[in-house]
Amino acid sequence: MSLLKDIQELVKQDLISDNQAEDIRTYYQKKNSQSGNCLFTIFGVLGAILVGLGIILIVAHNWDELSRLTKTIFAFIPLITGQVLCGFALIKKRENQTWKEGSSAFLFFAVGASISLVSQIYHIQGELSSFLFTWILLCLPLIYVMKSSINSLFCIIGITTYACELAYWNHPESSAYLYWLLILAILPHYYHLYKNRPESNFMVFHNWLLALSMVICLGTLSDKHGEFMFIAYFSLFACLYLLGNVRFFSQQKLLNNAYKFLGTLGTIILLLVLSFDWFWEDLRNKPYLFKEIIVSPEFMASTILTVLAVVILLLQQKNKKLLSVKPISLIFILFIYAFLTGLSSSISVLLINLYVFVIGILTIREGARKDHLGILNFGLLIITALVTCRFFDENLSFVIRGILFVSVGVGFFVTNFVMLKKRKNG
Amino acid sequence: MDKNYKLLAVFILLALVQIFIPAKMIIDSEDVLNTGVEYKFKTAPVDPTDPFRGKYITLRYKDNSVEVENKSDWLSGEEVYVVLNLNKDGFAIPKYISKEAPQYKTDYFKAKLSYVNSDISNRVRIIYPFNRYYMEENKAKKAEEIYRKSQSNKKHVAYALVNIKNGEAVLKDVLIEGVSIKDLVEKETID
């Protein structure tokens, strides 16, 4: 309101012309209506999710008073309602994203509710994994038919839970290879989102959920040679990190850049975990049969992901100076060296500690160069984490551990102090 | 316009599939209930909740293991066909298991093997696909109590009534001393 008044005043004072005033008004009107639309979609979808979940809970009460026939009819009411709403959105509200997202979110839960109710009426035990699989398969096409991003997000969550249920939580465990096919089925929508609505919240949510889902589910491939999964994980984190460095993602806020965030954090955490000797001791003492290993799923996953990471790295470094390469993006190659050495020698644990230390120092240097306190302190944090891990190492004497802690503490003070002083003077 | 019609056609197809899957579950279960052969499975002592399907009582079965010739032929979690027999009291017991459905006319159902351990016995355990009996939310707890009490009393016979047809099994009822557990809960609530 004050803005409109201001415009009138500016026109009166001949600071802007009538035409300019009109343009400004139209700009703000359009802007307001856009943010209003976004809010509508958020509330529409939230409403649909709550109603859908509510129906599932009401269904789960299991009404004994109702006959089997009545219960069966009830099983279809939410489903048909959801379908009618989606049909209506498709025919009458074709351009209205709120309607499409809201109705398909509702239908997603209605499908789940109706399968649950039928299973309950007939005491169909069925495993949670097969229930989730049927549910996702029945709702996955909705992503494309309704162009619904919320359905795509639900499907990613569903597929991830399905894979975890099958490979982590279920006993006896079985493999979840179908997970990868289902994730592939979602990628065209992700690409569509990237092309058409790259700035939307849905895009950010997709970045996060897809990356998290892959990080969680890569482990489902682990079978008898779990140690080799570390190579696969380092390469996956390298792929994520490199993807996060692509211009489209690197221009965004760090919190919106899930790939860079997870790639960095994942690499550092894995390195810290492996900076203890227990893993390497196991690796040295376990007999390995080359014939068995090269046909194992762990080896295949490691090979595919490593090749992928190398390809992305080479593409990104094309026409760039060799020294411009980010240290974290090279860890996956250095780790393979440490891993192969670790099969017979105990030096690998030292190598890993050295990697973490060098990454920490290089990050501090980058922070100092860019005059960025965040990066600088992140580097210090990496070193602190490394030192904290060594705190639990019984092989080191108290004095050495004490000196390490004191020096990192002093490092924190000095670097931050120098940087702040430099800023003041600058 | 053309594209929209296509999209609508795909949506209608999808909607039909979404209806077909639960409908098929109903039709198959009804078929087994109406025309399948009824078996009684003696249960053994065990209020879990399924986030989607509500409360149920977990049933464990007394005769859930079967002798095999060579244990190493069988894997943990493997899907098998269980062919049935009756014991002298008229309760169902597994006769044998096979990797393929029996070719001759007999009653059998699909199930999964539990962990196949490496002890010396030649028996493998079967996870029956009908070990959940769904109940109304506030009755499940009571039913669980009644069920547990009956299990501690050795004279009481608790069993599950299951219909079997063409490899499929549908749990019909859980009975204690011949009375449905639903009726027992009802009676106890009134008392």
Image: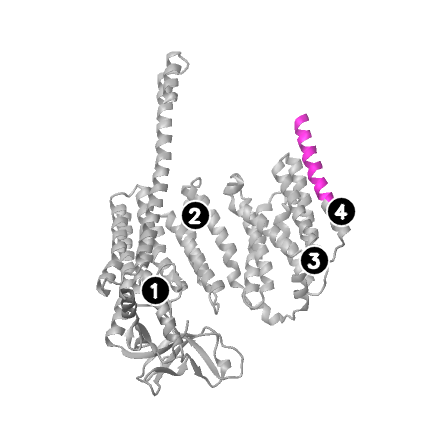
Residue where numbered disc 1 is placed = B140
Disc 2 chain ID: A
Q: Which residue is mark 4?
A: A403
Q: Is-magenta flag for residue B132?
A: no
Magenta portion: prevailing SS class: helix
The answer to which of marks 3 and 4 sits earlier in the sequence is 3
Per the image, the residue denoted by label 3 is: A349
Type of amino acid at the residue the image marks with label 3? Val
In space, the residues marked 4 and 2 are separated at their CA atoms by 52 Å
For the residues labelled 4 and 2, say whether their Cβ atoms are less than 8 Å apart: no
Mark 3, residues whose alpha carbon is within 10 Å: few (<14), some, or many (≥20)? many
| Badge 3 vs badge 1, beta-carbon distance below 8 Å | no
Q: Find out whether residue A414 is within the magenta segment.
A: yes
Residue located 50% across and 42% down the image: A256
- Is residue A170 placed above or below A205 in the rendered structure? below
Is residue A329 toward the left or the right of residue A63 in the image?
right
Q: Quadrant of residue A193?
A: top left
| CA–CA distance in space, label 3 to label 4 | 21 Å
For mark 4, name the chain.
Answer: A
Residues tagged by mark 3 and mark 4 found on one chain of the structure: yes
